[in-house]
Structure formats: C-alpha cells, structure tokens
Amino acid sequence: MSVAVPESAAALRASRAPRHALDAVVHPNPYSYYASLAARRPFDFDASLGMWVAAGPDALAQVLRHPACGVRPSGAVVPPALAHGPAGEWFAALVRMNDGAAHAAMKPWLKARLAALQAGRDSLAMLDEASQAACADAYLVCGNTPAARLDDFVFRQPVYALAAWLGVPSTQWTEVYEDVHALVAAMAEAGKPAPVEDVLTRAHHAATALRVRATRWLNADAATGTWLRDTARSAARDERIDFGALIANIVGLFTQTHDACAGLVANSVRRFAQSLCAPPPLVERSVAIRLVSDVIRFDPPVQNTRRFLHASAVIYDRKLAKGDTILAVLASAPSGTSADGIAWTFGLGAHACPGRSPATTLAIAGVHAILSSDADLASVAQSTAYHPLANARIARFAD
C-alpha cells in the first residue's frame, strides 16, 4: 500500500494559480498567469479587486500615456491616514505623486540631476564601502542568522549606497535608513482599512527628521563636490525650483530606492542561490551585472502600479468613468534585451522612473557584496516566500 507524501507549502503555492493580479506579486512563479492575462484579458474589469486591470504592452502603453490617468485619485493627493502631519506634507510634494504643473516643473529637472550621477571608479568604490557597512550593520541587528541578515541587508544596502553616492556623511547612514524605513512602512500602512496609529506616528517623526537632514545636506552638511552640493547650486540658479519641493523629492529618492532596489538585490541573490551546485568561487562584478539585468527582465521588483481616472475616457475600446481605478500590471509585459529598451518595471510615459541607471548600479553593488561575502546562500536557496506587498516583488529569506 502506498502512502501519499504531503506536498510542501511552497509546492502547493506554486501549483495554484494566483487568484488575481495582486495575489500574483507574491506567487512563486506568476509569469504564466501574467502571460495568460495579457493574451486573454488585456484590459478588463476585475470585480474581485474593484478596478480595471491592464496587462500586456499595448494596454499598458495606452494607460500609462493617457492624459486622463493620474497617479493619485482626483482631489486626494495625500492618503487620508497621512494627511494631517509632516509625512502628509512630504507626500504632497513628491513629483511622482503629482500631475500637471507640479509634476512638469520638477520632473525634467530632477531627471537631469540624476543623470549627473556617474558610476566611475571612485563612485563604485564608495558604493562598495557603503554596501560593506550595510553588511556589518545587518549583522549587528540580526546576529548570526543568515536568512534574517539577508532580509535586513537587501533593504538597508540600497539606502546606505544611495546616501554615500549623493554625499551624505557616513555617520548618518543608519539613522537615514531607519527614518526611510519608517516612511515606507507608513505608506503601505496608510492604504489599509484600519492603519496602526503607531506606524503613522513614527512616519511623521521620520519625515520631520529627514527634512531637517536634507536641508542641512543642501546647505553645508554634504561635502564639497558631492551630488547634493552640486544640486543645491543648480537649484539656486533656477528660479523655477521650489526649495521645499526639492527637499521633499530628495527624501523621495530614498523612499523609492527602498523597495525597488531591495527587490532587485533580493531577487538577484535568490536567482544566484538557486543556481548553485557547489560553493561559489570568487565572484566577479560582471556576474552581479548579469544577475540584475536578468531580474529586471524576468523577475522585476515593481510588478504593478495604479492609475486613477481624473475624467471619463475610452481606453482600449472600453468606456471608463471619472474616479475609476486601473491596476497597470507592469510585469505582464516583456522587457527589452537592450540597455536602452523598455524595462516595464520602471514604468512608461510622463511618470516613468528617471532612476533606472542609478537603481541598477546600486543593486549591482549590493548583489556583488553578498556574492563576494561568506554568506551561506545554500541555506536560503530553497526559500520561495516574498514580502507581503501589493506592488513590489521582494524575495524573503527568513520564515
């Protein structure tokens, strides 16, 4: 008589198709589901989610380029849970959360400033140093538990590395990360029906602290010749740039980096760990470059984004009303193979992320730091869990 061997929880999750596009973000392998969605229902209303869902390159392009589609609901730039306090004031000034004049003035200028971040030899050495500091601090926080340290590192490293690259003094990296972490947690919490008040309170304190720090960086705290000091000089010469908005958006660079780069690093490390047959030899930076490039194409961190109808419109031959919501499933469209091809995880149109190149460089530094360390990747190779987020796919190594 044969006895059935129970399937593991991971195997069961992998065998079941996602219930909907939000469930797919944390599924072990959602890409056949995404392909089916793009082929069979490229633009349709999902009653279980209460919103329209766009999948595949054609539907996504129509949504992301449509002038009636805004990045926040009409009349509600700030989530109500964050509205009354410093975190809400910060959120309201973010260029990526605004349409119209506020977006048009700051976005091109900020894009040009980000293009000034060069990945030369000195910059790469600086990013490597910051990544090692993140390794050390992850050990201090999590101790000798490889999976927990890795989970901490993938969020901490991009913030440390970005801080170093911009010119933030190393003595502030830990506090900056903690405040950024608090802000990002509050943005996720604010979308829940009953957000935890303590999470929101910490975010208000963090927003105040980061605003004070960013003001000092632009004034005098950052070293001469750094990106922050050059940006301050550039802003002083341009009467169109509001200094308060600039401060908010510099903080916004860190909050955008937190999840997006964590996904690039974590998903790359998991990809490498699952390919191991033996302990890895000395790993060249080129391996990290290839891993991050593959993750952008095949397992991207930002899987979806939302758009809100500011006016009635016809999109993909369907009539939508003002106030409707669209879930744009970025991961359902194949990304190009060339460096300048479309990488849907970074968006498209007026609100496409201008930080593709810096984000890739930050993630490569993080992946290289892990692959060059004595991290026990074999112990986390079989993990299939992801952090429970609605739009970011970030491999989770600790149960």
Image (cartoon, rainbow, N blue to C red):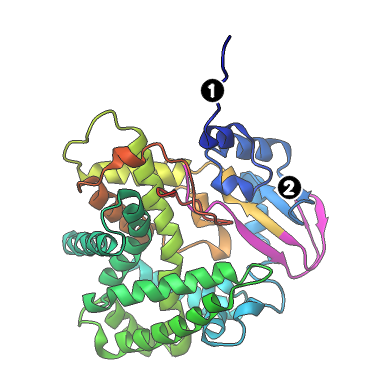
Residue 150: x percent and y percent? 33, 53
Calculate the distance from the C-alpha at mark 2 to the C-alpha at mark 1. 41 Å
Magenta residues (range):
299-325
Q: Earlier in the sequence, mark 2 or mark 1?
A: 1
Q: Is residue 31 above or below residue 366?
A: above
Q: Which residue is mark 1?
A: 5
Q: Position of residue 235 (x, y in %)?
A: 38, 85
- Select label 2 or label 1 by which is in front: 1
**Residue positioned most to the front:** 1
Q: Is residue 356 left or right of residue 224?
A: right
Asked whether 87 or 215 is in front, the reply is 87
Q: Check disc 1: other Cα within 10 Å, few if <14, some if 14-19, many if 20+.
A: few
Dot 2, crowdedness within 10 Å: few (<14), some or many (≥20)?
many
Of helix, strand and loop, which one carries label 1? loop
Residue 156 badge: none
Q: Residue at x 40, y 41 (%)?
A: 294
Position above or below: 259 against 12: below
For image coordinates 33% across by 77% down, the residue present is 175
* Quarter of the figure with residue 167: bottom left
Disc 2 marks which amino acid? Phe
Type of amino acid at the residue the image marks with label 1: Val
The residue to which callout 2 is attached is 43
User: Residue 180: horizontal and vertical position, in percent?
Assistant: 42, 73
Q: Give me the residue at 26% from left, 41% from top.
A: 287
Q: Quadrant of residue 80?
A: bottom right
Label 2 residue SS: strand
On screen, residue 224 above or below 189: below
Q: Nearer the viewer, residue 213 or 155?
A: 155
